C-alpha cells in the first residue's frame, strides 16, 4: 500500500513540487520515498511506500522495467502476482525477477502483454501510473471496484497532475482551482462527492475499472479514457447467466471463492489481522481466516458505552468461539473530539459519513499490532443486506400497478398541500412520484426541501444516479444493489476505509470485492440472497458452518456513533457553533447562513436531527482548515 503522485509540463521547480506532493501523503507510505523524472523533466513521478511485499530495496518505486521502456508508480496489491510471474517465466517473457514484489511482476506483464491485457489478468486493488518512454504515453488505471483512490486533472491550464491524495495536488505551485459549486448539492444530499467529481474545478476522480491515457504533449486534447471492467456489465452478465445450482450448492461455491480470496489476501511479509464486528460480513471473513490459518488470527473491534451502539461484547463472544487473538477498545466522546480536528486533512475534501470516526479509531488501534487488516465490506451491497432494499421492493410492489400518469399528479397534490409540512406525508408524496424502483431509492434522500437550500449555488451537476438506466436489471433489489455498487460503495464506504486506515499507515484488504466473488454474487437469484426481511441468506449459510446461528441472530447495530447526542455536549457544541458562525458563513459566501441557522436551531431548540448537520460541519471544517488555509497562503 502506497501513495502515488506526478505531473506533466509543470513550469515550476519539479523537484521541489514532487517533494511537497510526496510529503503530503507521507502517511500513505512512511517506509520509503521515491522520485523519477524523464530526461526532459516533462514527466515526473513521486511515490511513498508502505512496505508489505518484498521489504527490500528491490521493491522500491518508481520502478523501471528491465528493458527501460516503462516506468511505474503503483499503489495497491496484485493478489495473484505469483501466478502471473509463473506465466511470464513459462512463456519465456522474462528471464527472471530482481526481487519478489508484485510491482515488478505487474510492470513486466504490462510490457509483455500490453497494458489492458495485463490489467485484465490481475486480481487486486490498485491505482497505477505507467509511463511509456518510447511512445511518450502516460497511463492511469484504477481497480475494478474503486478500493484505491486516484485523482487527476489540469492546473494552470496546461499542467496535467495526478495523485492518490487530493491534498497532494493542492500542494503544487500554480494550483488555484476554485471550489466546484456544481457538486455542492450532491454533497449536501449524500455527505460525499461522487466520482468523477471532486470538490475542486478541473480535478476529477478516475472512476473504477477505468484506464486514462494522455499522450505527449499532455494537453486536454491528448486525453482519452476507456473502461476495462464494468460493474454494470458484470451485473448484467451475471443476471443473464444465472447460477444453476441449489441454494446449498451456491453457499458451497461462495465459501470456496471466499476462501480462495482470503488465502491470497492473507499473504504478506508483515503481520496481518482483521476487523471484527458482530455482523455477518466481518464474522464470515474472520471465521474463514481462522479456518485457513495455522495459528490464531488477530481480530480487532471497538465498543461504546452508549446503549444501542455497542457491538463489542457480541464481537468478543464470536472471537472467543472462533479462537482468535482478540483486541478491543472502548471509545468515548473524548476520543471522538480528539479525532474530529484531523478529519479534513485525512480526507482532503469534504466527507461526512460519521462512522469515519470509529473507523479511524479501530484502524489506529489495529495498526499498533499489525500492518494489514482484512475487512468484511461489500457483503451488504452484494448479498442484499440493507433493510432499505426490502423496503424499496415492498413499496414498489404496492405502487407499480398504479399508472405513473395517475401517481404523478397525486404526488404533486400532496407536496403542494399543507400536508407537506409533515415530514411523513412529504416523504410519502415524494415516493409516490417515483417513476421506477431506482428513482424510488434515490428520492428517499430528497424529501426535506430545507436541506436542498444549504448551498447558495444554483448550479447543479448532472445527478450521478441519472446515469443508471432504470430497469438495467429485471429484479428490483438487484437494481438498487447495483446503484449502491456504482456510487455509495466506492464513493462512501471505500473512501472512508481507505482514508482513515491510510492515515495511520494501515493497509486494508476487502476479500468480498475479489473479482470472482463479485461476478459470482451477481449470478445468484434474489431468493438466494433475501427472504422477507432477512438478507445475505447464502452468506449466512457459509458463516453458520463456523459460528452457531443463535450467536448471530441479533439486531444489527451498524458501525455508528451517537453524533446527534454528542453535538449537544458543551465542547462539541462550541466547536460546531464556531464553524457555522453567521459572519463566517457570510464572509465565505458558499452556504446560506439563514438556512444553516434554521437547521441548527431546529436541532438545538426542538430536537430535530438532520444528518445534513454533520454534512455542514464537515464541509465547514474543510473550508476553515484546508481550503481556507490555502486561500490565505
Image (tube, rainbow, N blue to C red):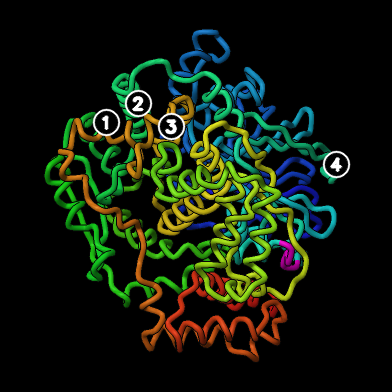
In the picture, the disc for residue 542 is 1
Q: Regarding mark 2 in the picture, which secondary structure is present there?
A: helix
Q: Regarding mark 1 in the picture, which secondary structure is present there?
A: helix
In the picture, the disc for residue 315 is none
Relative side of 323 to 231, left or right: left
Q: Earlier in the sequence, mark 4 or mark 2?
A: 4
Q: How many other residues sit within 10 Å of disc 3, few (<14), some (14-19) or many (≥20)?
A: many
Is residue 288 depicted above or below 150 in this figure?
above
Q: Earlier in the sequence, mark 3 or mark 4?
A: 4
Is residue 577 depicted above or below 419 in this figure?
below
Q: Main secondary structure of the magenta part?
A: loop
The residue carrying mark 2 is: 254
Give residue 233's position: percent from left, percent from top.
61, 29
Region in magenta: 178-182
Is residue 425 depicted above or below 118 in this figure?
below
Q: Earlier in the sequence, mark 3 or mark 2?
A: 2
Q: Earlier in the sequence, mark 1 or mark 2?
A: 2
Give the mark toward the camera: 4 or 1: 1
Give residue 423's position: percent from left, percent from top.
52, 71
Identity of the residue drawn at 49% across and 73% down: 610
Distance Cα–Cα, label 1 vs label 2: 8 Å
Distance Cα–Cα, label 4 vs label 2: 48 Å
Residue at the outermost top position:
91
Give the mark toward the camera: 1 or 3: 3
Q: Regarding mark 3 in the picture, which secondary structure is present there?
A: helix
Q: How many other residues sit within 10 Å of disc 4, few (<14), some (14-19) or many (≥20)?
A: some
The residue carrying mark 3 is: 526
The front one of 93 and 488 is 488
Amino acid at each position: 500500500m502506497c501513495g502515488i503522485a506526478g505531473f506533466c509540463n509543470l513550469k515550476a521547480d519539479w523537484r521541489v513540487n514532487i517533494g511537497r506532493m510526496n510529503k503530503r501523503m507521507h502517511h500513505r507510505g512512511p517506509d520509503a520515498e521515491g522520485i523519477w523524472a524523464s530526461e526532459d523533466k516533462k514527466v515526473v513521478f513521486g511515490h511513498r511506500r508502505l512496505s508489505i511485499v518484498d521489504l527490500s530495496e528491490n521493491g522500491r518505486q518508481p520502478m523501471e522495467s528491465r528493458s527501460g521502456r516503462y516506468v511505474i508508480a503503483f499503489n495497491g496489491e496484485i493478489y495473484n502476482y505469483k501466478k502471473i510471474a509463473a506465466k511470464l517465466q513459462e512463456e519465456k517473457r522474462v528471464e527472471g525477477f530482481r526481487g519478489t514484489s508484485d510491482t515488478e511482476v505487474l510492470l513486466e506483464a504490462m510490457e509483455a502483454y500490453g497494458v489492458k491485457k495485463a490489467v485484465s489478468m490481475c486480481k487486486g486493488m490498485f491505482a497505477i501510473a505507467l509511463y511509456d518512454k518510447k511512445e511518450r504515453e502516460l497511463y492511469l488505471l484504477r481497480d475494478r471496484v474503486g478500493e484505491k483512490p486516484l485523482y487527476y486533472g489540469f492546473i494552470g491550464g496546461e499542467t496535467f497532475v495526478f495523485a492518490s491524495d487530493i491534498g497532494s495536488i493542492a500542494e503544487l505551485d500554480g494550483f488555484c482551482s476554485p471550489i466546484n459549486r456544481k457538486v455542492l448539492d450532491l454533497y449536501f444530499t449524500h455527505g460525499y462527492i461522487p466520482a468523477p467529481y471532486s470538490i475542486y474545478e478541473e480535478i476529477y476522480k478516475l472512476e473504477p475499472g477505468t484506464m486514462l491515457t494522455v499522450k505527449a504533449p499532455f494537453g486536454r486534447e491528448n486525453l482519452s479514457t476507456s473502461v476495462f471492467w464494468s460493474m454494470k456489465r458484470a451485473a448484467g452478465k451475471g443476471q443473464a447467466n444465472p447460477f444453476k445450482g441449489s441454494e446449498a450448492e451456491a453457499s458451497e461455491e461462495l465459501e470456496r471463492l471466499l476462501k480462495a480470496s482470503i488465502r491470497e489476501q492473507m499473504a504478506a511479509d508483515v503481520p496481518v489481522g482483521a476487523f471484527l464486528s458482530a455482523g455477518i460480513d466481518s464474522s464470515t471473513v474472520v471465521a474463514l481466516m481462522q479456518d485457513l490459518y495455522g495459528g490464531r488470527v488477530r481480530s480487532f473491534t471497538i465498543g461504546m458505552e452508549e446503549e444501542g451502539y455497542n457491538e463489542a461484547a457480541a464481537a468478543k463472544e464470536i472471537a472467543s468461539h472462533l479462537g482468535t487473538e482478540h483486541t478491543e477498545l472502548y471509545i468515548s466522546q473524548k476520543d471522538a473530539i480528539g479525532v474530529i480536528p484531523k478529519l479534513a486533512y485525512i480526507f482532503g475534501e469534504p466527507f461526512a459519513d460519521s462512522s469515519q470516526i470509529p473507523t479511524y479509531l479501530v484502524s489506529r488501534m489495529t495498526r499498533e499490532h499489525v500492518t494489514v487488516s482484512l475487512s468484511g465490506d461489500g457483503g451488504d451491497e452484494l448479498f442484499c443486506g440493507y433493510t432499505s432494499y426490502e423496503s424499496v421492493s415492498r413499496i414498489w410492489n404496492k405502487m407499480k400497478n398504479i399508472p405513473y400518469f395517475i401517481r404523478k399528479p397525486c404526488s404533486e397534490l400532496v407536496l403542494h398541500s399543507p400536508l407537506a409540512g409533515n415530514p411523513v406525508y412529504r416523504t410519502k408524496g415524494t415516493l409516490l412520484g417515483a417513476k421506477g424502483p431506482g428513482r424510488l431509492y434515490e428520492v428517499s434522500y430528497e424529501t426535506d426541501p430545507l436541506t436542498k437550500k444549504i448551498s447558495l449555488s444554483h448550479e447543479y451537476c448532472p445527478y450521478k444516479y441519472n446515469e443508471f438506466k432504470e430497469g438495467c436489471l429485471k429484479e428490483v433489489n438487484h437494481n438498487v444493489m447495483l446503484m449502491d455498487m456504482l456510487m455509495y460503495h466506492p464513493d462512501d464506504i471505500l473512501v472512508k476505509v481507505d482514508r482513515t486506515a491510510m492515515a495511520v499507515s494501515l493497509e486494508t484488504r476487502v476479500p468480498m470485492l475479489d473479482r470472482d466473488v463479485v461476478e459470482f454474487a451477481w449470478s445468484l437469484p434474489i431468493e438466494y440472497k433475501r427472504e422477507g426481511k432477512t438478507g445475505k441468506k447464502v452468506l449466512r449459510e457459509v458463516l453458520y458452518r463456523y459460528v452457531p446461528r443463535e450467536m448471530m441472530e441479533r439486531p444489527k447495530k451498524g458501525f455508528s456513533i451517537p453524533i446527534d447526542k454528542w453535538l449537544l455536549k458543551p465542547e462539541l457544541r462550541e466547536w460546531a457553533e464556531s464553524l457555522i458562525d453567521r459572519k463566517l458563513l457570510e464572509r465565505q459566501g458558499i452556504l446560506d447562513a439563514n438556512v444553516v441557522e434554521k437547521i441548527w436551531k431546529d436541532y438545538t431548540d426542538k430536537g430535530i436531527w438532520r444528518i445534513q448537520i454533520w454534512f455542514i460541519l464537515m464541509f465547514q471544517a474543510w473550508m476553515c482548515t484546508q481550503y481556507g488555509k490555502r486561500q490565505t497562503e
